[in-house]
Image (spheres, rainbow, N blue to C red):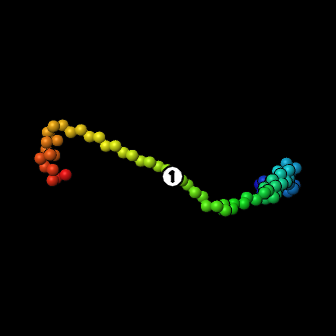
Amino acid sequence: MNECALTNHAGRPTKGDMTRMITIALLSAIGLAGGCVSVNAPDKPIVINLNIKITQEVVYRLDGKAKALIESNAGIF
């Protein structure tokens, strides 16, 4: 019951296990030997033009009593 997962009953790695380990080693080597990524700042500054026009129109209507109340107490507002 003291068997290693990558060995057969004789204590040696099986052919499938060796193939799997070689494949993993090759893929790791290819991954490490791949190209590198270079990130450089641009020579010119980044300019963002925000041309925003915000307009708001407020329309309100008052009934006769409210309008008369506002006119009689103009100092409140």
Provide the secondary structure element on which disc 1 rests. Answer: loop
In the picture as drawn, the residue positioned furthest to the top comes out as: 63
Few, some or many residues within 10 Å of mark 1 (<14, 14–19, 20+): few
Which of the 4 image quarters holds residue 57? top left
Q: Position of residue 72 (x, y in %)?
A: 11, 47
Which of the 4 image quarters holds residue 6? bottom right
Q: Position of residue 5 (x, y in %)?
A: 78, 53
The residue under label 1 is 50
Say whether residue 6 is left or right of residue 55.
Answer: right
Query: What residue is shown at x 69% (from left), y 62% (from top)?
Result: 40
Q: Position of residue 26 (x, y in %)?
A: 83, 54
Query: What residue is shown at x 26% (from left), y 40% (from top)?
Result: 60
Say whether residue 76 is left or right of residue 23.
Answer: left
Which of the 4 image quarters holds residue 22? bottom right
Query: What residue is shown at x 64% (from left), y 61% (from top)?
Result: 44
Say whether residue 77 is left or right of residue 31.
Answer: left
Query: What residue is shown at x 15% (from left), y 37% (from top)?
Result: 64
Q: How many marks?
A: 1
Q: Amino acid at mark 1?
A: Leu
**Observer able to see residue 69:** yes
Question: Looking at the rendering, in which quadrant would you find the N terminus?
Answer: bottom right
**Observer able to see residue 3:** no
Compared with residue 61, is residue 6 higher up or lower down, i.e. above or below? below
In the picture as drawn, the residue positioned furthest to the left comes out as: 72
Compared with residue 39, is residue 50 higher up or lower down, i.e. above or below? above
Comparing 43 with 5, the one in front is 43
Comparing 46 with 32, the one in front is 46
Q: Position of residue 28 (x, y in %)?
A: 79, 56
